[in-house]
């Protein structure tokens, strides 16, 4: 307890005794605790280093108000955690870049059950090929919403093709598409009763499933249609189908009004953003999952921090969890 803040067992015990205010001298405190006086003085020096104790004319020094000193210590700890999260994200991006370089260097980009398709033109050609080959079912997870319109027309055309051939069609996209006024995708989808579309607050990645036997995933979620991996390994495809069905079960039909605020006056998007923020995702990753702009993400984060009285993103996630918001 408190070791992560820099207080070892003896330092914590000494600090607790100082808070009670019952002792005036280090030798007296050492005798009370039954430890050498030098060990007590070492603990006092450690408390001074942590700004919990201020040296003064008195033997034990002057205790800094714990309401201020401990809060400052906690905030420094939070800052360190945020730095480590940023470092992790940088390492993850670097590792992903190395994996992509390895994939690009492989002759033909193939291995059993996996086929890599690189380049936007090649990816679009593969999508059209699959739309002609689909026989029974076409399932899709479509993040990014209206914040990036690059996928809207291709998605619309592919859905129209498979529907015309009588292939069952289901798609899950983000709630952000409900409030979009720049594109006609929502109206077009709603006009086709055979094309069932539902929405959720956020989605982790683009995904296409064809006839429950083939899956298509982007190699880089930041540029989903610039490179994909086609997967036909049965165990992997079955797991991805289960992932789609889980999102589908929890999604809301596009034609309905959608869920309202919860008992904490949080919209589904705000609650999901808090959950993603508490997991350490940065603004860009959250933007992709929610299908909104970076400006919108930062505006919602600032508003939530103000409502929670939080000085940092990490503290906002902590406060939200403590209050039962997430």
Image: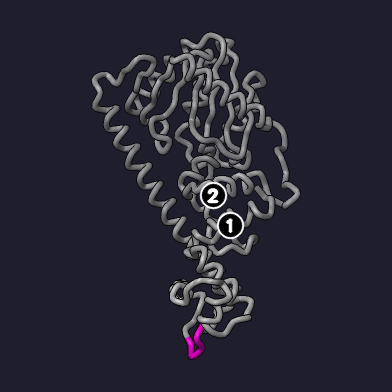
Left/right of residue 103 with respect to residue 309 in the rendered view: left
Secondary structure found at label 2: helix
Left/right of residue 239 with respect to residue 45 in the rendered view: right
Residue 314 painted magenta: no
Task: Quadrant for the N terminus, please.
Answer: bottom right
Residue 154 in the image, given as x and y percentages of width and height: 47, 26
Q: Residue at x 61, y 24 (%)?
A: 245
Q: Which mark is residue 170?
A: none
Answer above or below: position of 90 versus 44. above
Measured Cα–Cα span from mark 2 to mark 1? 8 Å
Examine the image and state in which quarter residue 69 appears: bottom right
Examine the image and state in which quarter residue 250 appears: top right
Q: Residue at x 38, y 51 (%)?
A: 87
* Front-lying residue, 28 or 11: 28
* Label 1 sits on residue: 316
Start-end of magenta stretch: 56-60
Can see residue 254?
no
Contact check, label 2 and label 1, Cβ < 8 Å: yes
Secondary structure found at label 1: helix
Examine the image and state in which quarter residue 80 appears: bottom left
Residue 57 painted magenta: yes
Q: Residue at x 73, y 47 (%)?
A: 262
* Label 2 sits on residue: 277
């Amino acid at each position: 307890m408190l070791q992560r803040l820099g207080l070892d067992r003896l330092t914590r015990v000494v600090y607790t005794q100082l808070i009670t205010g019952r002792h005036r001298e280090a030798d007296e405190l050492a005798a009370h605790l039954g430890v050498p006086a030098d060990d007590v003085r070492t603990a006092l020096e450690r408390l001074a280093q942590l700004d919990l104790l201020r040296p003064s004319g008195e033997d034990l020094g002057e205790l800094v108000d714990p309401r201020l000193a401990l809060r400052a210590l906690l905030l420094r700890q939070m800052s360190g955690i945020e730095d480590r999260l940023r470092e992790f994200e940088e390492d993850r991006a670097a590792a992903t870049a190395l994996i992509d370089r390895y994939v690009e260097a492989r002759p033909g980009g193939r291995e059993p059950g996996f086929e890599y398709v690189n380049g936007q033109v090649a990816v679009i050609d593969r999508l059209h090929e699959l739309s002609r080959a689909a026989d029974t079912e076409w399932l899709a997870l479509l993040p990014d919403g209206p914040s990036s319109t690059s996928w809207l027309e291709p998605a619309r055309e592919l859905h129209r093709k498979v529907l015309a051939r009588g292939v069952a069609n289901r798609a899950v996209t983000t709630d952000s598409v409900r409030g979009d006024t720049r594109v006609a995708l929502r109206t077009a989808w709603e006009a086709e009763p055979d094309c069932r579309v539902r929405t959720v607050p956020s989605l982790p990645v683009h995904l296409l499933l064809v006839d429950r036997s083939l899956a298509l995933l982007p190699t880089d979620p930041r540029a989903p249609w610039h490179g994909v991996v086609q997967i036909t390994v049965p165990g992997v495809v079955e797991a991805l189908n289960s992932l789609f069905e889980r999102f589908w079960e929890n999604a809301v039909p596009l034609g309905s009004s959608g869920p309202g605020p919860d008992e904490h006056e949080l919209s589904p998007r705000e609650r999901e953003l808090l959950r993603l923020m508490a997991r350490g995702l940065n603004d860009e990753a959250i933007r992709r999952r929610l299908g909104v702009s970076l400006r919108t993400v930062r505006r919602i984060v600032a508003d939530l921090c103000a409502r929670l009285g939080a000085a940092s993103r990490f503290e906002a996630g902590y406060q939200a969890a403590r209050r039962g918001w997430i």
